[in-house]
Amino acid sequence: DDKEITDYVTYTLNTTLGKAITALILLALRIARVHDKKGIKNDIKWSPKFKEKYEKILSNKIIEGFTNLGRYLPNFYYLDKEWVKGKIKSLENEKGSKYWEAFINGYISIGRVYDELSALMRPHYQYGVDYDFKEKRDNEHLVQHIALGYLRKHESISEKESLFKQILDKFNYDQIEDIIGFFWMQRKYLKEQTETDEDIRKRIIEFWRWLYEKYKDNTTLKEEDKKILSNAAKLAAILPQIDKDNFKWLMLSAPYVHITFNSFFIEYLDALKDKGDVKETAKDIGEIYLKMLDYFTPDFDQKHIRSIVEFLYNASAKDSANKICNIYGTRGYEFLRDIYEKHQNRT
């Protein structure tokens, strides 16, 4: 009882009680699924003896029981919806205790988010937003749950009651970075251009717009603010093309890209060169790149840098291309020399 636990899931996975309770849950699930295959349909899919056993585990305040309640909450919901609803409600009285922390630690460790459970868990999310978790990743996982709710249109960027808006208004630097990182991860899934994908893309872009409005007139940036703007530049990966709005967002981030070693930025600029009007895109990319060079000299990845410069020359943005090549040359970098020389005699 006096053992301090910071990672309840790892603790539960490695204790005898934790393993025994996990086996109990898996056995109940196995029996329920066999019954389903046999066509035996019941609203409550586990037997009273299993329920009584788990009730005893919780009433005896066995910490592994609370961790596994959270960790297997979707499975319990499959077994007995009303029982789960009651437990989620009753655990509101345990907020701030180690039992609540074990429960929420288990729940937010789940790799998937279920809409119906998210609605039931809203009071716990609300409390967790300001909770001082022992493990940073617990706060990160909680923020990801709420950010996913925003992407799925369950949360708003403007409504006062929205948990997502509350996080933005509070503007905890770690939480904002967690949101940016989570939205950046969505780039892997936004390639199909389905209606759902486009809705998600639009909501991420709307968040970036909100971030720009917050920072556009700020002339006294802390290091944490610069990190936010540096990380925000990674969201270029989800842009369909450069337009008059996101051009300003990219220009705002360009001076700070190096602060978080954001080597992806140049790769994303390179990818954007083939989207939209060629001359306008070349003009915008040239300005963004030169803005970046005012503050540091990126030399990785040279393949993408050369591709951008070649594009600028071919898209009638020779002035910008020349400036970029000359800056690199005067700073001791020679990898653009051949491209520069090739285009000097061309009109």
Image (cartoon, grey):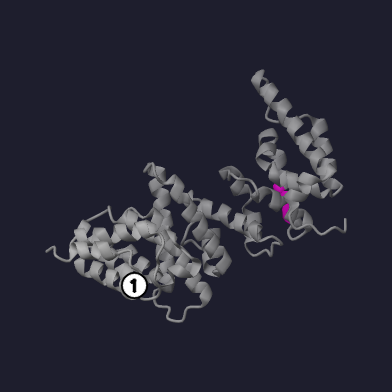
Q: Quadrant of the N terminus?
A: bottom right
Residue positioned 65% across, 49% down in the render: 109
Q: Quadrant of the C terminus?
A: bottom left
Q: Is residue 41 left or right of residue 330?
A: right
Q: Is residue 234 visible?
A: yes
Residue numbers of the magenta segment: 88-93
69 shown above or below 164: above
Name the spot of residue 197 as percent of width and height, x first.
Answer: 41, 45
Element on which disc 1 rests: helix
Magenta-colored stretch includes residue 89:
yes
Q: Is residue 162 left or right of residue 106?
A: left
Name the spot of residue 203 as percent of width and height, x first.
Answer: 42, 55
| Closer-to-camera residue (310/275) | 310
Residue positioned 65% across, 57% down in the render: 138
Name the spot of residue 71 as percent of width and height, x first.
Answer: 69, 45
Residue positioned 26% across, 62% down in the render: 338
Q: Which residue is mark 1?
A: 291
Magenta-colored stretch includes residue 114:
no
